[in-house]
Image (spheres, grey):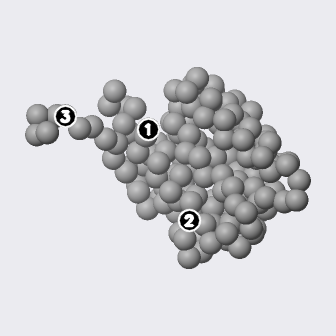
Amino acid sequence: MDDITHRRGNLDASGLRIAIVATRFNEVVVNQLVAGATDALVRHGGSPDDVTVYWTPGAFELPLVVDKLAASGSVDGIVALGCIVRGDTPHFDYVAGESASGVAAVARARGVPVGFGVLTTETFDQAVARGGGKLGNKGADAALATVETADLLRSL
């Protein structure tokens, strides 16, 4: 095992241009995700001047905006944030699935790291717990995943 080389990215956001694409739907939770993401980026050396937040109506619109930003060449990474709470109809399944697969497809096709911080929960209380409550802030987690992946890609 000692002969195996291990490479990983660092959590250093300095110099990285990061776009945060966030949904207005369930905005009370998403605002907390955005706050967690921006705080994590700045705490890890990022400049507030290098972070821009773009707002979409909902999670279904995330992949289009993420793709446009990734294609622009103006960002080193993107953080996708949203909150989808299951309701009484199958709408949740379609929106959550399309959002996740669309954002993943953009990252693969464009080669730009995209941290996925879209909460998909059964209840609003679960969303609150993951949006800065007792289970942490998944927006911060997604931002740090973006930073680490961007740094790793630079070394490849």
**Image depth: mark 3 or mark 1 in front:** 3
Residue 63 x/y as whole percent: 71, 36
Q: Earlier in the sequence, mark 2 or mark 1?
A: 2
Q: Can residue 20 be seen in this view?
A: no
Residue 16 numbered tag: none
Residue at the right extreme, as displayed = 89
**Image depth: mark 2 or mark 1 in front:** 2
Q: Is residue 59 visible?
A: yes
Q: Looking at the rendering, in which quadrant would you find the N terminus?
A: top left
Q: Which residue is drawn at 56% across and 60% down?
A: 138
Work out how far the residue at label 3 is from the one at label 1, CA to CA, in angstroms.
Answer: 19 Å
Asked whether 57 or 46 is in front, the reply is 57
Residue 41 x/y as whole percent: 49, 55
- Identify whether 117 is placed above or below 74: below
Residue ID for mark 1: 150
Work out how far the residue at label 2 is from the one at label 1, CA to CA, in angstroms.
Answer: 20 Å
For label 3, the SS is: loop
| Horizontal arrangement in the rendering, residue 69 relative to residue 18 (left or right) | right
Residue 137 numbered tag: 2
Q: How many marks?
A: 3
For label 2, the SS is: strand
Q: Quadrant of residue 106?
A: top right
- Judge the density around disc 1: few (<14), some (14-19), many (≥20) Cα neighbours within 10 Å: many
Q: Which of marks 2 and 3 is nearer the N terminus?
A: 3
Q: Which residue is drawn at 40% across and 32% down?
A: 153
Amino acid at circle 3: Thr
- Judge the density around disc 2: few (<14), some (14-19), many (≥20) Cα neighbours within 10 Å: many
Residue ID for mark 3: 5
